[in-house]
Image: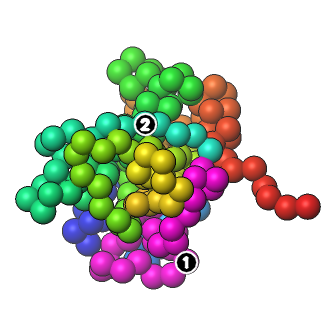
Amino acid sequence: EMQQGIAARRLGVVAHHITDAGSAIVVDGFSTVHCAGPTPPSGTGAAVNKVREGKEAYVHFTTIPTQWRDNDIYGHVNNVVYYAWMDSAVNRYLIQQGGLDPVKGKVVGYAVSSGCNYHESISFPETVECGLRVSRLGTSSVKYELAFFKAGSKLAIAAGFFTHVFVDSTTRRPVSALPDTLRCALVALQPKPVGP
């Protein structure tokens, strides 16, 4: 209930357009925030992929230099920093490739869900390569999947997800359709099917 309340406050008016489906909040037909405990039930879409994937599974890459302040008392990059990296990688792509203007634009994205699994640590002054892809594209929402790689490494040191709901910047209600430039940029992040 506490997470649901936080999500509702963050979304403001958008919360009126989100339906409660048992233990998860559903936007555009898929779960975005689990509300009943630390482990999401299977099938909610809120779980993070725990498999260590390689770079070939991602479509777009951003290089992120670690900073001295990223290290925690244990001498490695703190877990919360990965969330900031996800936010920055996604929004940098949306601004540069999708024409998103978070200050003056008619459409803005609200983060409604995120999660991350950690496989290996990294420390300052190492450099991180962030892989990005879209796993689900709805009418007004998108689920990104991201992975972090040490420079020169082929396996992810961490992998997470990030879900945006796009809203009208004035009414704060979900848009009925994404702007064409934004949708095209998001479609470009969907992995190409592999097969014969």
- Quadrant (top left, top right, bottom left, bottom right) of the N terminus: bottom left
Magenta stretch?
A: 32-58
x, y percent for residue 176: 60, 39
**Residue count near mark 1 (Cα–Cα under 10 Å), binned few <14, some 14–19, many ≥20:** few
Q: Amino acid at mark 1?
A: Gly
Q: Earlier in the sequence, mark 2 or mark 1?
A: 1
Q: Position of residue 166 (x, y in %)?
A: 48, 40
* Residue 42 among those drawn in magenta: yes
Q: For mark 2, what is the residue?
A: 63
Q: Which residue is mark 1?
A: 43
Q: Is residue 150 left or right of residue 5?
A: right
Residue 6 falls in image quadrant: bottom left
For this view, does 171 lie left or right of residue 124?
right
Which residue is depicted at the point 58% across and 53% down?
55
- Seen as rendered, the residue at the extreme right is 196
Q: Which percent across, then down, holds residue 149?
A: 44, 52
Residue type at the position of mark 2: Thr
Inspect this view and state whether residue 141 appears: no
Q: Residue furthest top?
A: 104
